[in-house]
Image: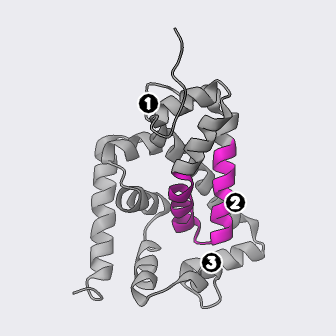
Amino acid sequence: MSRKPVSPESSDEELMQAVCLDEVPAFGLLYGRYKGRIISFTRRLLQNQQKAEDATQEIFLRILKKKKTYNTAKKFSGWLYSIAANICIDELRRLKFSGSNEEIKYQNAVAGHADAPYQEMEKTEKEIIIKKALNLLTKEQKMMIILHKYQNQTYEEIAEILGKDYNQIKWQLKIAYEILEKELTPYFR
């Protein structure tokens, strides 16, 4: 029984199965399909364009290194975002505990300091206000909001990505949205 060749119309799971068989074009198609979304996800978490691009490269390298651990019964996007979340958490921990100049830049970015690198990308006051509100959340709540609101992941998908119970995700997102609503209501009436 022969497998049909991969194409841009192939599902994520079909492409990943081809990647597991060392079919280079399949990886290129997955990379093209998800690169923008992953950069967006990592930039929102790391709040630095260069770190987001570096993390994105690490995420796709990790896919190649860990391809044999991919469970074909699960959605590829859930596995991908799980890898992305873990790499971002590791980077945030590294920045927090390094005590280097990078940590100062990170703290400035989180606080909305004027010389923070990501400030250059800010286009509107609304985006700045939303970023400040997101920074009031825990890392986990922030990640859940980004996955849900910006990456269009369902509660079930977020639970799978983060390895948590569905009801726990639902409850944590409810709390996070309440915090954001309380913080943002004075600005967006």
**Regarding mark 3 in the picture, which secondary structure is present there?**
helix
- Asked if 128 appears above or below 9 in the picture, the reply is below
**Residue 76 in view of the camera:** yes
Please tell me the numbered disc located at residue 127: none
Q: Is residue 171 left or right of residue 11?
A: left
Give residue 74's mark: 1
Nearer to us in this view, 169 or 25: 25
Write down the region rendered in magenta.
Answer: 34-61
The relative height of residue 45 versus residue 188 in the rendered view (above or below) is above
Q: Secondary structure at mark 1?
A: loop
Which of the two marks, 3 or 2, is nearer to us in this view? 2
Q: Residue furthest top?
A: 1
Callout 2 amino acid: Asp
| Label ID, residue 54 | 2
Using residue 43 as the reference point, say whether residue 172 is left or right of it: left
Q: Please tell me whether residue 167 belongs to the stretch shown in magenta.
A: no
Dot placed on the residue nearer the N-terminal end, 3 or 2: 2
Q: Residue at x 60, y 91 (%)?
A: 114
Question: Is there any visible trace of residue 85 in the rendered image?
Answer: no
Judge from the rendering whether residue 166 lies leftward or rightward of residue 84; answer left or right.
left
Sequence-first disc among 2 and 1? 2
